[in-house]
Image (tube, rainbow, N blue to C red):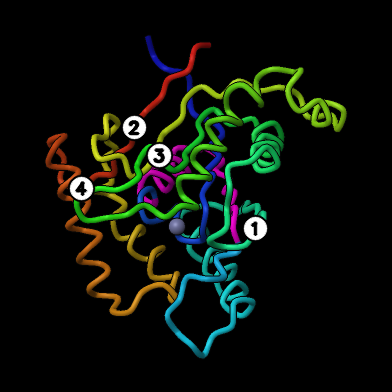
Amino acid sequence: MIPPPIERVLVVVAHPDDPEFPAAGTIATLTDGGAVVTYVIVTDGSKGTGDRSLTGPALAALRVDEQRAAARVLGVEDIVFLGLPDGEVVADLALRHAITREIRRHQPDIVITHDPSTYYTDTYVNHPDHRAVGQATLEAVFPTARDFLNAPHLLAEGLEVHKVREVWLTINPNPDHIVDISAVIDRKITALHAHRSQFGDPDALAQRVRERAATIGAAGGLALAEGFKRIVLPA
Ligand SMILES: [Zn+2]
């Protein structure tokens, strides 16, 4: 059976740059294929720096501009900034409902978000905001966006229930959905370079991105890839 086309995608992440690091190539491929991709950036990104000349609000303003520039490279125009304080996200009911509002508003076929089960690996401790946003997003997908008696204030606002078809989770150590990004790797790197406040040497970043894509690709017989844990929900 030919799967139905992917028309709308919602990317729900904690910080500016979180869409691009694990998924820029996939996002570019989706928009090239005609899908409308919308970002929901949960925090203001106001703590992600070691530069002591920057204040939190100045950094937050910078990162909004960086995120818009990065998204534009990938064909994404619509970005919702929820503006929660960076580093303080809790997967509470308020966040679940805020994400549910965006799911009901945008009616996505696919939701891309953080894998909340990735706590740490041998070389990496996952940011608590990533885990919290991933958890709240899964809880929003099911049951809150789907079932009308959940968050009744949203239905009262005219936001109809919505069934998401699939969720693709980023930064899972054992991805089972491998996307070929060989043709769009340069756009991924260009998009990441837009996040100037987050990276030092642009060449080192490009090399790191290529190496990571090659490692993920090797598992699927591809030159360069991104990987996700894929959840296919019942119709
Ligand atoms: Zn992040």
Q: Would you name the residue on which mark 4 appears?
A: 224
**Label whose residue precedes the other's in the sequence (1 or 3):** 1
> For ligand 1, which image quadrant applies?
bottom left
Q: Would you name the residue on which mark 3 appears?
A: 115
The three-letter amino acid code for the residue at tag 1 is Leu
Residue at 59%, 58% (x, y): give it.
Answer: 43
Tell me whether circle 2 and circle 3 mark residues in contact (CB < 8 Å).
yes
**Label whose residue precedes the other's in the sequence (2 or 3):** 3
Give the foreground label among 4 and 1: 1
The three-letter amino acid code for the residue at tag 4 is Leu
In the image: residue 116, left or right of residue 146: left
- Dot 4 lies on which element? loop
Residue at 24%, 48% (x, y): give it.
Answer: 121
Indicate whether residue 68 is drawn in magenta: no
Residue 37 occupies which quadrant of the picture? top right
Does the beta carbon at disc 3 come under 8 Å from ligand 1? no
Give the foreground label among 4 and 3: 3
